[in-house]
Image (spheres, grey):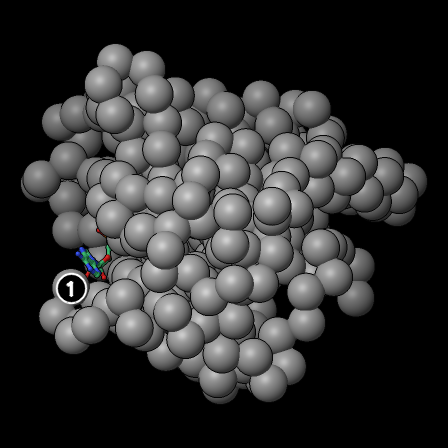
Amino acid sequence: MANLIDGKAIASKIRGEITAEIAALKTKGITPGLAVVLVGEDAASKVYVSMKEKACQDVGIFSDEHKLSADTTEAELLDLIDKLNCDLRIHGILVQLPLPKQINTERVLEAISPHKDVDGFHPYNVGRLVIGKPVFQPCTPYGVMVMLKETGIDLNGKEVVVVGRSNIVGKPVALMCLAQHATVTICHSRTKDLAAKVGNADVVIAAVGVPEMIKGNWIKPGAVVIDVGVNRVGEKKLVGDVEFGPAAERASAITPVPGGVGPMTITMLLQNTVESARRTCR
Ligand code: NDP
């Protein structure tokens, strides 16, 4: 039976380290600041934003909230981002996605200063990741890498199979594994014989968004399984992209859903904000 990779415990340990680092920064007169911008009334976005604000308060980050109405124009949002780019109290800017239809998401993300882009979505930061010199790394893939490191899993020379090629999870996590000297295969909806590809992996990273589509009997005995997927099934139940029970019988280590990758994402947002504030001391 696989060891459970406990994302909650790892996130809590990292948050403890972040809290200590913020206390040290404050003795030098620096309080890390994160601006969180929410446009409109999307229910899930409101929940994410309040979780981020609470996480900031818990570790001692100054959280600057901007809640804008659903009819905000692109020009108004760009104007706010300009102000936040110049505000010395702010080290990170997060614009909660999705944005209302009248606003061009790409233009907004590119307007954020790359030096305050704690979500790691600006093309400058994407490019830095591609050349192996990251500044800000996107939070979910960054969290996956920290989990692997904290669990003592070395990727050097390993076969890693990433299922999913989104800009926010699949592609960046593949690049991060490559930087750790893994041999990386990226699979997607047009991939032929996914079962065989997954069956070849020493480490499987699933970021698909389809409940339990990766079957337990595809997993190579002894492989590590990282399940990024969060899928609601019925009223209350959450499941991952991997068929957890049968996969856990074959894997050497596996992340649960919930309680695996999920708790790491906001933690890495806090980490990026603190790293940004720390750079102002240099
Ligand atoms: P996207 O929908 O943007 O991407 C899904 C990817 O999966 C695409 O590349 C798609 O291929 C691929 N795919 C879809 N169906 C199949 C299939 N049958 N076989 C192989 N590949 C397939 O999703 P995200 O990357 O944004 O998110 C993925 C999952 O991770 C979701 O469940 C999401 O909720 C979760 N998530 C969790 C986070 C966390 O904090 N824990 C944060 C972010 C996401 P193609 O490109 O060909 O369409």
Quarter of the image where one finds residue 98:
top left
Disc 1 designates what residue?
189
**Could one spot residue 59 in this view of the protein?**
yes
**Could one spot residue 118 in this view of the protein?**
no
The foreground one among 218 and 95 is 218
Can you say whether 171 is above or below 98 in the image?
A: below
Rendered location of residue 175, percent (x, y): 45, 75
Residue visible at 25% across and 25% down?
233
Quarter of the image where one finds residue 109:
bottom left
Quarter of the image where one finds residue 19:
top right
Is ligand 1 closer than 8 angstroms to the Cβ of mark 1? yes
The foreground one among 63 and 127 is 127
Rendered location of residue 25, percent (x, y): 83, 45
The foreground one among 13 and 160 is 160
Rendered location of residue 85, percent (x, y): 47, 52
* The C terminus lies in quadrant: bottom right
Residue visible at 74% across and 61% down?
152
Mark 1: which secondary structure? loop
Residue visible at 8% across and 40% down?
102
Badge 1 density bin: few <14, some 14–19, many ≥20, Cα 10 Å: few
Rendered location of residue 219, percent (x, y): 42, 60
Kindly give the residue lying farthest to the left in the view shown: 102
Position of 3 with respect to 244 (left or right) is right
Kindly give the residue lying farthest to the top in the view shown: 235
Can you say whether 142 is above or below 37 in the image?
A: below
Residue visible at 36% across and 27% down?
238
Q: Amino acid at mark 1?
A: Ser
